[in-house]
Image: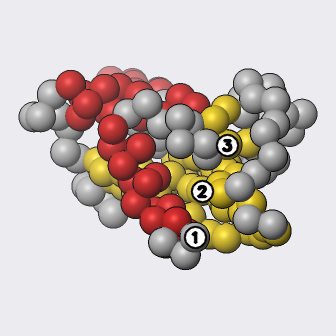
Amino acid sequence: MKNLKKIVFIIFCLIFVSCSVENNNLDTLNGNQVQLPNVIKILESKQYNSKGNFDFYFTAESDFVGGSGGCYTVNVRVYIHDISNGMKTLIVNENVKVGDCPKEKSNTKSLNSECESFSLKNGDSFFSNGTQSPYCMSQLIKYDIIYNNYIESMSKFRDKN
């Protein structure tokens, strides 16, 4: 009987330890625990290898925020989709100025964000909107998948100009 109690106790301890280790691998995002994959690693495998990881895909969405005098502010969000569980996770949330906008100083960090302001060659100027997200657009836009999704999501605003 003592051996049975010891075995049950050991099994209980093993289960407890394994559950604790699993939870340590979860990132906290907006107060919820979600398992966020290494986005940079996935993007690099897709960028340089046509047989890259197809368990995930990326999308970009954009919405008009405001504007005047030919200069428009648009909110841009990038999501990663996990095909295995259907989960859609926000990984970037920043604003961009497009159109005929006055030139602003770039490569500065906002007080509300770790993300740097920057501009693309086409003149689109990204800046923080004060929200926190796991990645910055400046980190991800260099990957063709993210850049192409961004351009596609912005086409509805460019077609109007």
Q: Around disc 1, counting alpha carbons within 10 Å, would you say few (fewer than 14), some (14 to 19), or many (20 or more)?
A: few
Kindly report the distance in space between the C-alpha atoms of the residues bearing marks 3 and 1. 17 Å
Residue 77 in view: yes
The numbered dot on residue 161 is: 1
What secondary structure is marked by label 1?
A: loop
Q: Which residue is mark 3?
A: 125
In the rendered image, the quadrant that contains the C terminus is: bottom right
In the rendered image, the quadrant that contains the N terminus is: top left
Frontmost of labels 2 and 3 is 3
Kindly report the distance in space between the C-alpha atoms of the residues bearing marks 2 and 3. 12 Å
Residue 18 at what x, y percent from top left?
41, 30
Q: Mark 2–mark 3 contact, CB under 8 Å?
A: no
Q: Mark 3–mark 1 contact, CB under 8 Å?
A: no
Q: Residue at x 29, y 48 (%)?
A: 56
Q: Quadrant of residue 4?
A: top left
Colouring: secondary structure
| First-in-chain label (3 vs 1) | 3
Q: Residue at x 57, y 56 (%)?
A: 77
Looking at the rendered structure, the kind of residue marked 1 is Asn
Q: Around disc 2, counting alpha carbons within 10 Å, would you say few (fewer than 14), some (14 to 19), or many (20 or more)?
A: many
Q: Which residue is mark 2?
A: 76
Number of marks in picture: 3
Frontmost of labels 2 and 1 is 1
| First-in-chain label (2 vs 3) | 2
Looking at the rendered structure, the kind of residue marked 2 is Val
For the residue pair 68 and 45, the one nearer the viewer reads as 68
Residue projecting furthest to the bottom: 160
Q: Residue at x 46, y 52 (%)?
A: 150
Residue 16 at what x, y percent from top left?
48, 33
Kindly report the distance in space between the C-alpha atoms of the residues bearing marks 2 and 1. 18 Å
Frontmost of labels 3 and 1 is 1
